[in-house]
Image: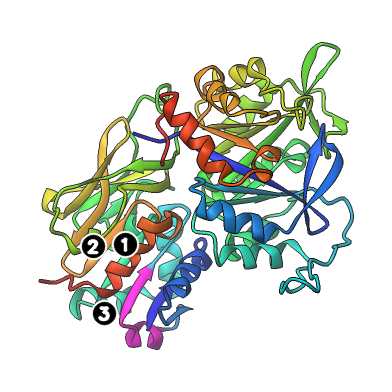
Amino acid sequence: MLKKRLIPCLLLRNGQLVKSTRFNDFQIIGNPKVAVQFFNAWAVDEIIFLDISETKEYVSLSRNDYNYKTLDNIIEILKDIAKICFVPLTVGGGIKTLDQMDELFRNGADKVSVNTEAVYRPGFISEAANKFGNQAVVISIDVKKNDNKYEVFVNHGREPTGLDPIDWAKKVESLGAGEIFLTSIDRDGLLKGYDLELVKMITETVHIPVISCGGVGKWQDLVDGVKIGGVSAVSAANIFHFTEQSTRNAKKYMAEAGIDVRI
Amino acid sequence: MVLIIDYQMGNVGSVKNALDFLGVENKISNVLTDIKRATHLILPGVGSFGEGMKKLKKLGLIDTLKEEVVDNKKPFLGICLGMQLLAQNGEEGGLNSGLGWIDGRTKKFNINEKKFTIPHVGWDDIFINDKEESLFKGINSNVFYFAHSYIFEVKNSKNIAAFCEYGEKFCAVVKKDNILGTQFHPERSQKSGLKILENFLTAKLFS
């Protein structure tokens, strides 16, 4: 049977791995390659990399006490990570052209996630799906409650679009998206669990896999995402960074709750 | 030298990374002399059937590949789209003829899309038909990573070395003498996937 997936989401900001709260308050965690080495050994099913840099300045990752070379752009980081990563890798952040996607695929990405550009130019979703296949195109949808109504936001969660998440999810599906990566901006970093109402709304609307993200504070939240939210995959960022064997423990917990996962 | 055929369809890089990790000499190329010189050929691929065949034709690879694989029996592994292209024809992106080295056709999943999300993405169990098959020796798990919307409907069940089930049974590993194909991505299936690649490169496939 198709397994439910556990996918750590790594946020990169100017070359550094960060954690965030409500798409803000960034705290530097460290080197992305080290995180991938751990996750690769800890039975994660995929890894998602989102470059959330807003400037082109890259902080050098070389430190005198480590032997890491300087990685000064996302392609270099990706190339380096792809050498040790043998699970699928999704990369996103600031994707606007097919050429950008092509470069990511050539350097080790299996899927590319698109967000803001898809809203500005929905036809881009079809172009990408036609060129690279549906399975390679992940549409990220960031949602925030605005006046008690769910609304899609773009541009690092700052720009309201007026789009209703249900309508937008239907549209991206019809345009050829292979998966939806759904993040609740309100829950990001708050450790209160997924916004299950939102998650359920989307999984009941589309017939493509939905990955939920934003808010996981305990392993039970992952179980709820699957059992209540109905997602194909659960993702989280912050929670995986701070404990040893975290992803393995998360999967063990999910398996004990009766979810079919790859152990 | 193992040759990863570059026909501009998808992530040849991840296959190369896996072979590098295994310490196997390899090269990404679409030059005919490289295809002739190689000990093993790997055809990866992500994208549509029609587009894949178009690229192979455009690069002028089809005759040489047939010569090396079908006539000279060079070990060949097709991955995902690379496996589907082995069929006589495929219906993705209009009806197109394929390499035709294994009888069958590539068609869309014929399942209830309300119950089964398409594409079939993620880790799924495979069921091995021939336990003695050297390709599966020493794998520690039967769970592999899939990402596809189309399946290879193989005509002769003898050629189905393993199958998977997702609303319907479909071929997960196809095998005909020296020609192998996996619908899943061994290069993305962690330890078991790397083991399959290693087995393909070391096993005696033709006994």
Discs 3 and 1 lie in a common subunit? yes
Region in magenta: B32-42
Taking the image as shown, residue B114 lies to the left or right of residue A1, namely: right
Q: Earlier in the sequence, mark 2 or mark 1?
A: 2
Quadrant of res A22:
top right
Q: How far apart, in angstroms, are the residues tagged by discs 3 and 1? A: 22 Å
Rendered position, A134 above or below B135: above
SS state under label 2:
helix
Q: How far apart, in angstroms, are the residues tagged by discs 3 and 2? A: 21 Å
Near-viewer residue (B107 or B179): B179
Discs 3 and 2 lie in a common subunit? yes
Q: Given the image, on which type of amino acid does mark 3 rest? A: Glu
| Residue B70 in sight in this render | yes
Location of the N terminus of chain A by quadrant is top left
Q: Is A94 included in the stretch rendered in magenta?
A: no
Quadrant of res A99:
bottom right
Give residue B68's mark: 3
Q: Are marks 2 and 1 in contact (CB under 8 Å)?
A: yes
Q: Name the residue: 24% across, 77% down.
A: B74
Residue under pointer 1: B196
Taking the image as shown, residue B116 lies to the left or right of residue A138, namely: left
Q: How far apart, in angstroms, are the residues tagged by discs 2 and 1? A: 6 Å
Task: Please state the horizontal and vertical placement of residue A186, each as a whole percent of the image.
Answer: 79, 24
Near-viewer residue (A38 or B124): A38
Give residue B135's mark: 2
